[in-house]
Image: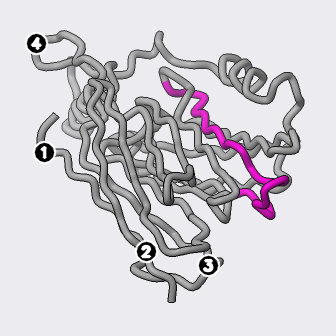
Amino acid sequence: MNLTRRQMLCASVGAAAAGVFGFSLSASATPEATAESIKNFAGGKEPAMGGDLTLTTPEIAENGNTVPIEVSVASPMTDDDYVESVVIYAEGNPNPDVAVFHFTPMSGAAEAKTRMRLAKTQNVVAVAKTSKGQVFMDKKEVKVTIGGCGG
Amino acid sequence: MDNIKPRVKVPKSASAGEIITIKTLINHPMESGLRKGKDGNLIPRQIINKFTCEFNGKSVFSCELEPAISANPYIEFSAKVTEAGTFKFSWLDDDGSVYETENKIAIK
């Protein structure tokens, strides 16, 4: 095999990155599996795209190991009208589940931030459910650069 | 696990009815269970699977975490302060350990 220095470097960095994530391609989740989970969470309701829910992610994540994400839902957060839970999915991870946030009227605002892992470039989906039974959804694509090889 | 140290940032005081931001961080490897060790075997999963925050015994915020959360999980959320009291934070580990910390807040 005649690899140039650059190709060699890319290949080894890619292999190292694969080792860090340890994700095999066959174990990857699919958008279908995510859609199924969303259906279960929403209780058969069709989630309204956008609306009061905002999912904030970086457009490009250089390091898939720590990708900062933020969800916020515009809600009065009173005893009879508040956001019960927000669930985050990553369509291309081995397991699409990321986190479920549970809010109460004591939360004051339905906002949360955390840092997540992304195996590859993919869509991140957030679904929110309010105490009145409304369901909102937001979706953002995050480009993940693994080892600078354009993965 | 040893050497797990939760860190929490809560304002020392707030005016009644104010919505404050709480930042939490705990050092933990969040081993996903999908990674292979040097010997080629899978490293068993060990993550923080649940985080809860209570204020004077009442639930404020909680979340369930999956292996897709980064190592040293950072969680930021808000809370409405209506009275002086104590925030109690707990992190639940896969191995059954519970890491806890408390923060007091006063009313201005």
Residue A118 seen in the figure? yes
* Chain assignment, label 1: B
Q: Mark 1, residues whose alpha carbon is within 10 Å: few (<14), some, or many (≥20)?
A: few
Q: Residues at marks 2 and 4, common chain?
A: yes
**For the residues marked 1 and 3, what is the alpha-carbon distance in whole angstroms?**
34 Å
* Chain assignment, label 3: B
How many numbered marks, from 0 up?
A: 4
Type of amino acid at the residue the image marks with label 1: Asn
* Chain assignment, label 2: B
Type of amino acid at the residue the image marks with label 2: Ile
Q: Give the residue at mark 1.
A: B3
**For the residues marked 2 and 4, what is the alpha-carbon distance in whole angstroms?**
49 Å
Is A15 in front, or is B35?
B35
SS state under label 1: loop
Q: Are marks 1 and 3 in contact (CB under 8 Å)?
A: no
Q: Check if residue B63 falls in the magenta segment.
A: no
- Look at 22% across and 18% down and name the residue there: B43
Q: Nearer the viewer, mark 2 or mark 4?
A: 2
Residue A7 seen in the figure? no
Q: Check if residue A75 falls in the magenta segment.
A: yes
**For the residues marked 1 and 2, what is the alpha-carbon distance in whole angstroms?**
27 Å
Type of amino acid at the residue the image marks with label 4: Asp
Q: Give the residue at mark 4.
A: B39
Q: Give the residue at mark 3.
A: B18
- Look at 67% across and 57% down and name the residue there: A110
* Mark 3 vs 2, N-terminal side: 3
Kindly identify which numbered label has been placed on residue B105: 2
Q: Are marks 4 and 1 in contact (CB under 8 Å)?
A: no
Type of amino acid at the residue the image marks with label 3: Glu
